[in-house]
Image (tube, rainbow, N blue to C red):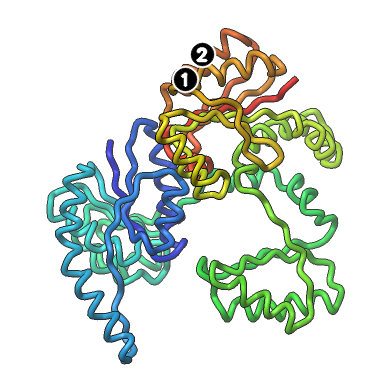
């Protein structure tokens, strides 16, 4: 099955689209998922970080306020609109999708409409109670419409083919929720009430201003709360200014996304096992702190390009690796990526991963083998590890959205407890 998903503009459209992609891959690991969007939009960064193929199509919205600047922008919009039809048709011929899903944003308009005209199966997902203009225009022409809430059904204008399904959520959210007490301990929350506030993914100015007032009041009144606030992409500088103006000093927690991705699943399984034994949260955290230094994380990549995007490796090293055709085997330690070997080809790299387990693993434990669209090689590694360590508890997971940020497609890796 080959699926093309069109979504853009804000994370409110893009994150549900990524969750849908993850669910499709879980249901059918052989499925090919492609995305369409603007390279200048947030979707390009989020989708390529997740490791999915990205197809560029330029489309922008009309500016309603009359000004010279907006007149220029609207002329560009008309030009993009005129070109969007042929670009969408070329995209269909290139991808050859069995299904096209629109998740909102201007960019989904020409892509979904073109697919519908070509007789390709189409679907929409509307995340809001008040549907966007694009989804309302597309709803009559698609095969099926999915709405997050009942209030959107009539507004979409196609009630006979609209199903209320809610908003898709990435599975890692539930994994973290199950580890609630451990996370509270990691944050140092103690007995305090934890407040999480957020606005739009790009940053809602008024939300940031109100939250800054609240944070200042909480600190000045010595309220027993731990307040975590997501400013949004364009709200970081504003919130820093508001902190200075209102005289409060936030506690800032920085998590390395790669560290969370690699090895976290292993830690969660360990925490659950310790909890089953009746250990209190404090003892579990203490044990995990001792053990996390022994987690070995090795991964083989087809290219270093995504790692360069994430700032993990330099441009010269990336270029040299691609020119020479080498496949890097990397090790993740203390938030840093280091060389664990340079392989002449991919099979040699897979052999090296197995040898890392053979020589360094504490046998009989939990092993996670992860991959981004490379299930056969992941299964091959699992088979060989079972031959080495029959007592190992092996889990194979597709984790493109988590690992693809730094590796891209075609990555196979392993995490395990070292001796």
Q: Secondary structure at mark 1?
A: helix
**387 over 52 or under it: above or below:** above
| Front one among 117 and 242 | 242
Number of numbered callouts drawn: 2
Residue 385 location in percent, x, y? Answer: 57, 14
Q: Secondary structure at mark 2?
A: helix
Q: Please tell me how crowded label 2 is: few (under 14), some (14-19), or many (20+) other residues with Cα within 10 Å.
A: some
Q: Quadrant of residue 95?
A: top left
Relative height, residue 130 to residue 138 (above, below): below
Q: Residue at x 69, y 80 (%)?
A: 242
Q: Is residue 102 left or right of residue 194?
A: left
Taking the image as shown, residue 143 lies to the left or right of residue 193, namely left
- Residue 281 horizontal/vertical position (percent): 82, 41
Query: Residue 182: which quarter of the image?
Result: top right
Residue 303: assigned label: none
In this rendering, does residue 166 appear at all?
Answer: no
User: Residue at coordinates 63% horizontally, 30% vertically from top-left?
Assistant: 297
Quarter of the image for the N terminus: give it: top left
Residue beneath label 2, please? 383
Which residue is identified by label 1? 379
Q: Give the residue at x 56% y 70%.
A: 199
- Residue 336 shows in this picture: yes
CB-based contact (under 8 Å), mark 1 and mark 2: yes
The image shows residue 140 at horizontal and vertical percentages of 20, 63
What x and y, as percent, mark residue 393? 62, 19
- At horizontal 58% and vertical 81% (from top left) the residue drawn is 206
Between the residue at mark 1 and the residue at mark 2, the CA separation in whole angstroms equals 6 Å
């Amino acid at each position: 099955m080959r699926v093309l998903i069109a979504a853009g503009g804000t994370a409110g459209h893009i994150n549900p689209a990524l969750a849908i992609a993850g669910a499709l891959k879980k249901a059918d690991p052989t499925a090919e998922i492609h995305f369409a969007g603007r390279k200048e939009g947030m979707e390009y960064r989020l989708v390529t970080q997740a490791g999915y193929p990205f197809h560029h199509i330029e489309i922008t919205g009309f500016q309603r306020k009359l000004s010279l600047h907006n007149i220029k922008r609207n002329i560009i919009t008309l030009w993009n609109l005129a070109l969007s039809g042929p670009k969408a048709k070329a995209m269909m011929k290139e991808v050859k999708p069995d299904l096209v899903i629109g998740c909102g944003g201007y960019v989904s308009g020409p892509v979904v409409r073109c697919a519908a005209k070509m007789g390709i199966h189409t679907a929409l997902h509307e995340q809001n109670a008040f549907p966007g203009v694009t989804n309302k225009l597309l709803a009559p022409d698609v095969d099926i419409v999915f709405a997050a809430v009942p209030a959107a059904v009539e507004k979409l204008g196609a009630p006979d083919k609209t199903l209320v399904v809610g908003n898709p959520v990435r599975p890692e959210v539930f994994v973290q929720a199950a580890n609630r007490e451990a996370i509270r301990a990691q944050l140092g929350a103690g007995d305090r009430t934890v407040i999480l506030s957020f606005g739009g993914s790009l940053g809602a100015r008024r939300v940031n201003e109100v939250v800054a007032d609240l944070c200042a009041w909480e600190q000045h009144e010595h309220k027993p709360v731990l307040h975590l606030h997501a400013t949004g992409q364009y709200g970081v500088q504003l919130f820093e200014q508001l902190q200075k103006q209102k005289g409060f000093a936030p506690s800032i927690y920085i998590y390395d996304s790669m560290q969370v991705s690699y090895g976290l699943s292993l830690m969660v399984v360990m925490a659950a096992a310790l909890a089953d034994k009746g250990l209190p949260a404090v003892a579990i955290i203490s044990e995990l702190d001792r053990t996390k230094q022994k987690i070995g994380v090795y991964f083989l990549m087809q290219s270093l390009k995504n790692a360069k995007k994430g700032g993990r490796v330099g441009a010269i090293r990336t270029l040299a690796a691609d020119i020479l055709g080498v496949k890097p085997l990397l090790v993740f330690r203390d938030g840093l990526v280091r060389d664990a070997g340079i392989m002449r080809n991919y099979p040699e790299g897979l052999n090296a991963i197995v040898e890392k387990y053979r020589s360094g693993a504490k046998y009989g434990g939990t092993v996670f083998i992860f991959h981004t669209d490379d299930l056969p090689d992941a299964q091959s590694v699992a088979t060989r590890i079972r031959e080495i360590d029959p007592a190992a508890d092996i889990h194979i997971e597709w984790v493109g959205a988590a690992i693809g940020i730094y590796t891209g497609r075609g990555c196979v890796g392993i995490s395990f407890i070292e001796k």
